[in-house]
Image (spheres, rainbow, N blue to C red):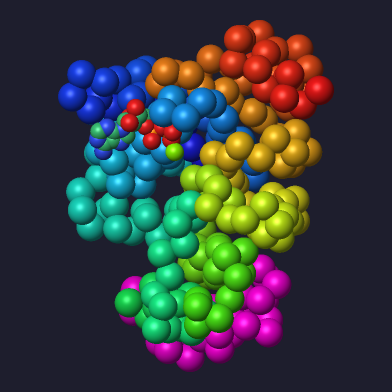
Amino acid sequence: MLRIENLHKQFGDLAAVDGLNLQVGRGETVVMMGPSGCGKSTTIRTVNRLVEPDRGRIMFGDIDITKLNADELMAVRKKIGFVFQQFNLIHRLTALENVMLGLVMDGMPREIARAKAGAALIKVGLDKHFQHKPGEMSGGQQQRVGIARALAFEPELMLWDEPTASLDPILVREVLVVMEELAKYRASTMLVVTHELSFALHVADRIVLMNKGRVVEEGVPTQVFVKPQSSIGEQYKELIE
Ligand code: ADP
Ligand code: MG
């Protein structure tokens, strides 16, 4: 479903992404890990071109995302859900309205958008919070609204950039549970940047370890965390033991 080939992104003198290759198969959950600053966010943001890559191909099915014009890109972005570390909710709107907003702006009739937004909120366990504004919800609930907002478009691919990183430790679990259910029970394809080792170990189909803008190791969790082949892998193994 997603195939990134020889991706490069330079910021001034810094090669943030330096010849990265990565594939995510249909239905697969791939967890991307690596030290802070190694290029995870830059990589994931090139997929919907929030960051413009310098070089390389990003194949989404048989479409090269790097070659699309603005209109084509808009159409493809609807198929790719993105959940960020920051929830970016609109504070004067309710949970339901936050999830509806993108659908309505995309031209969907309000009643259909309302139904789809409601279904997405139910999927993330927020059936009782349709009318709550972000300020009336916990961080974990707000992030679940963020997830529902992405799900409402019924994306083919979900990108997650440290979705639990700005949550209090006790709120992390409720978000991980939602992510785990999506990984398991939906036929969704997920590329997840996270430092949550337990999620990586138990939910990922495959782990990709990055360092200095490249993939240094990849494999199934037991392989990467039990018999690592890279120094980065060794560091994660020690964390798990
Ligand atoms: P990660 O998500 O793995 O922590 P990032 O992809 O955010 O890493 O960043 C990779 C490197 O690129 C870091 O050194 C970061 O400071 C740098 N970087 C990221 N975005 C920009 C930008 N817009 N301008 C300049 N440097 C950037
Ligand atoms: Mg990052």
Residue at screen point 30% across, 58% down: 74
Q: Is residue 158 above or below residue 121?
A: above
Say if residue 204 shows up in the picture: no
State the image quarter where residue 102 is shown.
bottom left
Determine whether 229 is above or below 125 in the image: above
Query: Where's residue 190, x and y in %?
Result: 58, 45
Name the residue: 48% across, 19% down.
211
**Considering depth in this image, is 163 or 29 the residue closer to the camera?**
163
Which residue is at the far right? 241
Ligand 1 quadrant? top left
Q: Position of residue 212 (x, y in %)?
A: 42, 18
Span highlighted in magenta in the image: 106-132
Q: Is residue 180 above or below residue 29?
A: below
**Does the magenta segment cover residue 131?**
yes
Q: 232 or 151, which lies in front?
A: 232
Relative to 60, is 172 on the left or the right? right
